[in-house]
Amino acid sequence: MTDTRLTPLLDALADHQLDAAAFVPGPNFFSLFGRDFHLMERPLVVVVTRQGEAAAVVPDLEMGSFGAIDFPGTVIPWRDQDGFDAAFDALAEALPSLRSSQALGVESQRMRAFEHMALQRVFPQAKTLDAHGAISAMRICKTPEQIESLREAIRRSEHALEVTLKHVRVGMTEKMIESMLINALVEAGCEGLSFDPIVAAAGNAAEPHAHARDDYAIKAGDPLLIDFGGRYQGYNADITRTFFVETVSDEHRAFYNTVLNANLAGLKASQPGNTAHDIDDAATAVLEASPYRDCVVHKTGHGLGLDVHEAPQIMRGNHHTLKPGTLFTVEPGLYRPGEIGVRIEDDVAITEDGCEVLTHFPKTLQIIGTPA
């Protein structure tokens, strides 16, 4: 009898006409077995066929931890001194059906070349295909327990932001603020960072993926964009808010409110039965109808969960229908090079009759850095 943990993967294989899937440690592995392993120079590769047969090549030093997942198939350990070639030969013996012409899906955005080459050597007749989307599709709809993990990641992250903002003052560098935020995330009980925070002021905020500087002291009137998140039980918060230091010009206020209106339009379109295209179109249309249409540089959002960026991509042209349990971000932005960038990002869950906005940090324009 097939292990029920494999059911989401087997359904994905059937839906995409794949005979088997091969994957390595990462979100898909964690989703199936509830345990993570590091990607390192020693390959750990799992292969599952559409019939539910499973086999794994596992470094010997990981066998103690791997045993804890009660893997539903053949486990083939290998030692450093022996190399992994013989283990992959044994993998082929354990899954003879893949030695004929079969469609073998691999995680193209996760699997390294040497792991792929090892599979090709022992399954030369199999056709390896890019199945990153197909394999990851099993993670699009989250369970209530998984959504609760993200709620807690968000709660701890927003507390850390609140603590950090109390200490921001004119004259601080972006690096100083970044360090305070990271410390606050740790103190809030986050298990790690979702990603390296983006803390960007003035013209640096116009770079969507800016790096914090240690040679720029923030000034009155600067926009301060903070994109960050903490992780809890494997689930990643992803939140962006943009603030203004001590004061804000009328032009920058209008710029900010345009992004806020786009964010609200995207949230309004976040309904079950709508598509990712619908959400992006609703939000981006607000930006394009403004005097700042030339400042639009990216889509409205992305799926969220064990990966910070995962399916579905919230963009025009993606007609994936949103079902209850889908988690994603709504994060429109405007960027005027050398002057200002504004992004407002919420984390959203589709429900049976609408959506739940999981982020609660205020979005009305905030002035920070004023001494008490």
Image: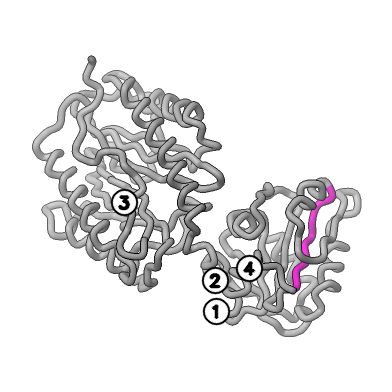
Give me the C-alpha separation between circle 1 and circle 2.
Answer: 8 Å
| Figure disc tally | 4
What amino acid is found at the position of numbered circle 1 in the picture?
A: Asp
Give me the C-alpha separation between circle 3 and circle 2.
Answer: 25 Å
Residue at image location 37% in from the left, 43% down from the top: 239
Q: Earlier in the sequence, mark 1 or mark 2?
A: 1
Disc assigned to residue 134: 2
Q: Mark 4, mark 1: which one is toward the viewer?
A: 1
Residue at image location 82% in from the left, 50% down from the top: 63
Q: Earlier in the sequence, mark 4 or mark 3?
A: 4
Residue at image location 70% in from the left, 82% down from the top: 102
Residue that numbered label 3 is attached to: 331
Mark 1 lies on a secondary structure that is: helix
Give me the C-alpha separation between circle 4 and circle 3.
Answer: 30 Å
Give me the C-alpha separation between circle 1 and circle 3.
Answer: 31 Å
Residue that numbered label 1 is attached to: 15
Q: Earlier in the sequence, mark 3 or mark 2?
A: 2
Q: Position of residue 275 (x, y in %)?
A: 33, 70
Q: Which residues are magenta?
A: 53-60
